[in-house]
Image (cartoon, rainbow, N blue to C red):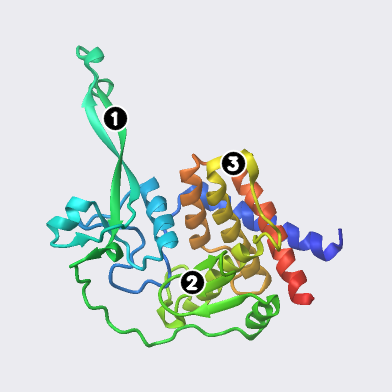
């Protein structure tokens, strides 16, 4: 191993340790830094209660929105949409959320401890996104035109050399394996937050998607096997976010991992019951992704 490569790996390990420390200290709510207004909120929201969904339902609906290409975080059951004067379109596929129904345990009826008498049973509910219904008008959103993103020449050169096809427009950030293309929101949708500038957010999101891009079958063919089972998608998200953190450090976009990285990673770890080993597996995969991007750029 060359001295330069070892130095990079040491930096990556340091970043990983900082992120873990931030997670252990407690992280804030995840916010997507290109959602300026309207229903594009940090968490999916229920049409009936106007309250954000909680826990695993956040991740479940985020994944459903990515898969369906939904740009708004407003969800509801079939009946809730009817009560709102809307109708779910025929043939639309629902997404699942989990809620817990409380009932009394007859076997502990004489117990003085109320908590022992209460049992909770997980139930699944079917919900639909606002993009799947007719008859509901979203509030008008102010037109955004101010671009707060400053392109960094060295970063743009690095990304260009990878050869990745990147399209810009709309409100969604994702890597589409079918077309092998990266989609990015319009630059003017990004804004400054307490944890970084619009420029940092834009490049961090792009590098996150670029890390996903490296996992394609004809590139690194990244899979996580049976060890992580149903959590393979979560591990891939951990890998992409760590890859973004590593690249931000390498390219001088930010000197240290922001709270955004830790918050995002912590949400996926929570869904996996905080499997600490997952962070290190993802960190290893992220390091390989970064080296691949550097190699492809040099090539």
10 Å crowding of disc 1: few (<14), some (14-19), many (20+) = few
Q: Measuring from the top left, give residue 119's x and y in whole percent.
A: 28, 26
Q: Which of 147/83 is in front?
A: 83
Query: Residue 114 at what x, y percent from top left?
Result: 22, 22
Q: Say which residue appears at 34% left-offset and 84% top-offset.
A: 144
Q: Residue at x 54, y 51 (%)?
A: 233
- From the viewer's perspective, tell me whether residue 281 is left or right of residue 43: right
- Viewed as shown, does residue 3 lie left or right of 240? right
Q: Which quarter of the figure has residue 40?
A: bottom left
Q: Residue furthest front?
A: 91
Distance between the alpha carbons at the discs numbered 1 and 3: 27 Å
Quarter of the image for residue 90 reads bottom left
- Of mark 2 and mark 1, the one earlier in the sequence is 1
Which badge, 2 or 3, comes first in the chain's sequence?
Answer: 2
Picture disc at residue 228? 3
Q: Residues within 10 Å of mark 2 (few under 14, many from 20)?
A: some
Q: Nearer the viewer, residue 285 or 168?
A: 168
Label 2, label 3: how far apart the Cα atoms are? 32 Å
Whether residue 29 is visible to the viewer of this picture, yes or no, is: no
Residue under circle 1? 120
The residue that label 2 is drawn on is 196
- Where residue 53 appears, x then y in whole percent? 31, 51
User: Looking at the image, is 242 positioned above or below residue 206?
Assistant: above
Q: Would you place residue 20 above or below residue 256 in this image?
A: above
Q: Residue at x 18, y 67 (%)?
A: 135
């Amino acid at each position: 191993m060359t001295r330069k490569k070892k130095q990079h790996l040491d930096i990556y390990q340091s970043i990983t340790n900082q992120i873990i420390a931030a997670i252990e200290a407690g992280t804030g709510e995840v916010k997507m830094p290109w959602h300026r207004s309207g229903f594009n909120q940090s968490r999916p929201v229920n049409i009936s209660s106007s309250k954000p969904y909680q826990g695993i339902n956040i991740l479940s609906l985020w994944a459903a929105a990515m898969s369906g290409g939904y740009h708004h975080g407003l969800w509801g059951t079939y009946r809730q949409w009817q009560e709102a004067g809307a109708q779910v379109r025929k043939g639309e596929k629902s997404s699942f959320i989990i809620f817990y129904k409380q009932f009394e345990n007859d076997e502990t009826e004489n117990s003085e401890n109320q908590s022992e008498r209460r049992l909770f049973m997980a139930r699944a509910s079917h919900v639909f996104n606002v993009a799947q219904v007719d008859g509901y008008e979203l509030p008008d959103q102010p037109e955004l035109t101010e671009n707060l993103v400053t392109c960094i020449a060295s970063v743009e050169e690095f990304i260009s050399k990878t050869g990745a096809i990147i399209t810009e427009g709309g409100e969604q950030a994702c890597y589409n394996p079918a077309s092998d293309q990266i989609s990015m929101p319009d630059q003017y949708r990004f804004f400054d937050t307490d944890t970084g500038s619009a420029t940092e957010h834009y490049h961090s999101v792009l590098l996150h998607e670029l890390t996903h891009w490296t996992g394609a079958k004809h590139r690194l063919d990244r899979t996580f096997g049976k060890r992580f089972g149903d959590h393979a998608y979560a591990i891939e998200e951990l890998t992409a976010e760590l890859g973004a953190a590593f690249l931000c450090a390498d390219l001088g976009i930010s000197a240290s991992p922001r709270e955004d990285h830790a918050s995002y990673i912590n949400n996926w770890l929570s869904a996996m019951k905080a499997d600490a080993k997952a962070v290190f597996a993802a960190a290893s995969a992220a390091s390989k992704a970064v080296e691949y991007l550097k190699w492809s750029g040099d090539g």
